Amino acid sequence: MRRIPIFAFILLFSTSVVHSALANDNLKVQNLRTEYHANPSGLDVEKPRLSWTLDGEGRNRSQSAYQIVVASTKEKLASFDGDVWDSGKVMSNATNQIEYAGQTLQSQTKYHWKVKVWDEQGQESQWSELAYWSMGLLNFSDWKGIFIGLDVGHQTGNKYDSLYLPPARYLRKSFNVQKKIKKATAYTTALGLYELRLNGSKVGDYYFLPGWTDYNKRVYYQTFDITEDLIPGENVVGAVIADGWYSGYIGYALLVHLDKVRGFYGDNPSFMGQIMIEYEDGSKEVIVSDNTWKANQGAIREADILMGETHDARLINSGWDAPGYDDSSWKKPKIYTHPNGRLQAYPGSLIQERERLPSVSVTEPKPGIYVFDLSKNFAGIVELKVEGAKGTKIQLKYGEMLNADGTVMTENLRKARATDTYILNGDGVEVWKPKFTYHGFQYVEVTGFPGKPGLDAITGIVLSSIKTDASSFASSSEMNNQLYKNILTTQSANFFEVPTDCPQRDERLGWTGDAQVYCRSATYNADVSAFFTKFLIDLDDAQRWYGAYPNFAPFPYSRPNQYAPAWMDAGVIIPYNMYKVYGDTRIVDYMYPGMKKFMDFQADASTDYLRPGGGNNWGDWLAVNETTSHDFIGSSYYGYDADLMAKMALALGKNDDHEHYKSLFEKIKKAFAEKYILENGYTTEDTQTSYALALYFNLYPEELALKGAARLAEKIRNNGNKFSTGFLGTKHVMLALTKYGYADLSYKLFKQTEYPSWGYSVVNGSTSIWERWNSYTKDADQNSSINAAMNSFSHYAFGSVAEWMFIHGLGIDTEDAGFRNIILKPSISEEVGFMKGSYNSINGTIASSWELKGNKLNLTVSIPVNTKAKIYLPASKVSYIKEDKKALDKISDIKVLSSTANETILQVGSGQYSFSVIMK
Ligand code: BGC
């Protein structure tokens, strides 16, 4: 028999004492979500996926089993009657992507659920708080309404010379509630944009409903629980509708004189919806959009996303959406044909108000022209507060920068008129904000204001699909801290129903190249699981018949050949990142047939495994001083796609496909190396971007990779530690450098403040990420020529450095999919004194904070319950590491995995750890 040494016995004994004391503190189950949303209304997925996170004291805490109970009523759930589904005790550590597996879910039904878990010692947690989801209208036959609107005429005159901006339409219906209501739900949608009104108030907190889709393929609807909003007696439901993406102006069509400039999906907006009322006595009633509604025009005279909104308050039909209003002068609505698209529940993140920004200054650069500064460059609208004579007309113009004379710069908006007008009614203080337009801006120029406005005349309202941030970041460099804020601001400004390139000019399209370089960064900054799910559906819908993914999605234009290397690849790269970050195989499965078709398209377009840079190719868009050939970029992305396809095929259990794409990747890699990589490790292109892509995409023959990395480092040093890269190269340079041991050089690029660098924009006062490295210079002459051209000051693409900040700066990454096995590998460098930050992963918050003092490193990390982490420390001996002042061999819950001259790797479970490391 093997004898256990006495000290080991004591150790075992003492740790188990400590452990069981801690285990008394049961795990807490929190943050219950269904399909990535807390308590969502109106789902239409057959098997919604459930998730939660865990909290618990101590270390090495994990879930060994769970039980989910779903009930038809709250009461049943409270009394543990899982009449819809009781999973029983499931021996599993899964806390997310868990498919509902109970009875078939019914249309228009609310489901209540809760969870309990067992910890690593089999100890039961308390039940979680109650959560719910409800199902929407699951069958087409559930829809009883028709699409209604109002005829307001049509455009006359030349579409390129004058704008056509029709008024909003107002629709109303009065109905009576005689009995006690048990439950009332509104299911509503529009072709165009709608705001739902009930008894005088807006229903829900959302903007730009029902969202943007290819309306010929699908139209999303919303579900609102309005049980509390109905009153005994007369009730009024109303809808205000406007063109939006359906029939308004979109993108650059007017600028380049496309065959259509507006009305891409239809000429007029229309609304459809129904209110389902269930009475206490069991009876039901449904109020549907039909020809018994009344329709009219009103105060909103113009409403267009790009052009702006005009509101004539003299024309308000006071009380039109409330009981007691006489609508006898209103018209019958016009009936519109049902679209071809399927009606579906909205799967994404709706646009909401995120923040209010008070004006920080108001100037008067010219008599009667007032310029308000809202402190940062954002996307949204303003609220105007004014008192004055009836008929006074106030005009609001929006811009990101000021001209030399202090007025607002609008040249870079191109054909986006971005102007709102408000005409006063004259009855006291009037407070107004637009409903159907938005702008990208920091400054507002106000003309026609009665008297001298105070700061409170204009308040900024930040709108975004992102409600809350998911990360924090701080370092010893104030410049880098501001850069992080600018990245968040710009993400929030552009994650606006789709990932738009920019929020201000006549574009605002879901450009795929921008989205693919930035998507991993986006996941660190916010929970974008639902947002990208929706965008991927758009991308799938927009896939060209021949297999390429287009330049942007949705793709409303009739231009057949709009695809480009590194843009179209978003169709593979974004699904892969959703899998990697959220462990989401469902979206990968959804995209899979399209992705295969895309790979076939690439195979057809290639010769000997090299894909030429066909399509309308922008190459390394906005690179400075170096050009990487389009063919090189085309082939490198083809290789990257094959590699990601192999990984996704494996995740879906498609083993043949996995083998196929793995071998395709090897073939591409070989052909690529033969054509583009020289024996000395140089690329034939010898540009920063060419090294960054080939190294990051693993296209280098192993024996030459170090030489390639050395050449990249040399080129950067020779360039004064500055970039020569554009959208594509920039993201990959520091990722490649750090991978091959050049962390110090990455930090030099990160801290650089000379043009071209991020720091250059920060020291020039930016509050956002710019489209170009030199979007703005203090040199007035150069500036005016750049500004007049295409130049946005809110373009998230160059913000892709966030990925490096989190993966390498703070060192937070995931080994496999979904942050279950965490990698904590900060790149420690004397270039930075400290870094501190956190990331709310799908499994809970991961924190990392390091500080370097001389040769002593302090690293504090926090690892969420039910996950493990490999911690990489720059210690040449295990004895140089202490945790909480103790030597590692005195700590049983830290395992040394390996230790070499450069690095020691530790394995830990959940908990807080404080390491000190002597670096020698
Ligand atoms: C957009 C970019 C986009 C590019 C394609 C621009 O107009 O703003 O962000 O990726 O076109 O080159």
Image (cartoon, helix red, strand yellow):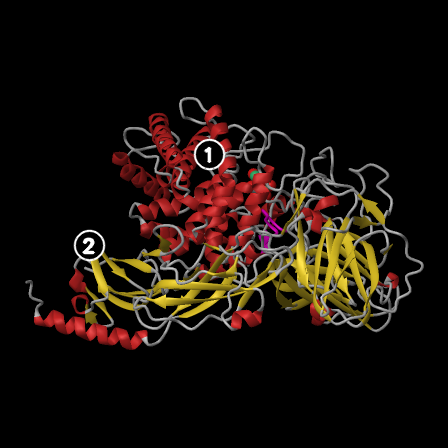
Q: Nearer the viewer, residue 518 or 177?
A: 177
**Would you name the residue on which mark 2 appears?**
898
Q: Which residues are magenta?
A: 493-503
Give percent across and percent down for residue 109: 62, 60
Q: Is residue 658 left or right of residue 77?
A: left
Residue 696 is at least partly visible in this image? yes
Q: Residue furthest top?
A: 607
Up-down relation of residue 675 to residue 491 (above or below): above
Q: Is residue 569 above or below residue 196?
A: above
Residue 903 image-quadrant placement? bottom left
User: Residue at image x 33%, y 30%?
Assistant: 677
Near-viewer residue (165 or 889) = 889
Q: For the residue carrying disc 2, how many other residues have a C-alpha within 10 Å: few (<14), some (14-19), or many (20+)?
A: few
> What percent of the width, then of the height, locates residue 627?
46, 34
Identify the element where label 1 is drawn. loop
Q: Is residue 40 magenta?
A: no
- Residue pictured at 16% horizontal, 72% vertical: 11
Quadrant where the image shows the C terminus = bottom left
Question: In the displayed image of the protein, which residue is found farthest to the right?
Answer: 329
x 41%, y 49%: residue = 580
Residue at coordinates 74% horizontally, 56% vertically from top-left? 274
Relative to 235, 710 lies left or right: left
Indicate which disc, 2 or 1, sits on the residue closer to the N terminus.
1
Kind of residue at badge 2: Ser
Structural crowding at the residue carrying mark 1, measured as other residues with C-alpha within 10 Å and reported as few (<14), some (14–19) or many (≥20) = many
Q: Is residue 23 left or right of residue 111?
A: left
Number of the label disc, if any, that sits on residue 627: 1
Task: Give the Cα distance between marks 2 and 1.
Answer: 43 Å
Q: Quadrant of ligand 1?
A: top right
- Residue 104 or 651: which is nearer the viewer? 104
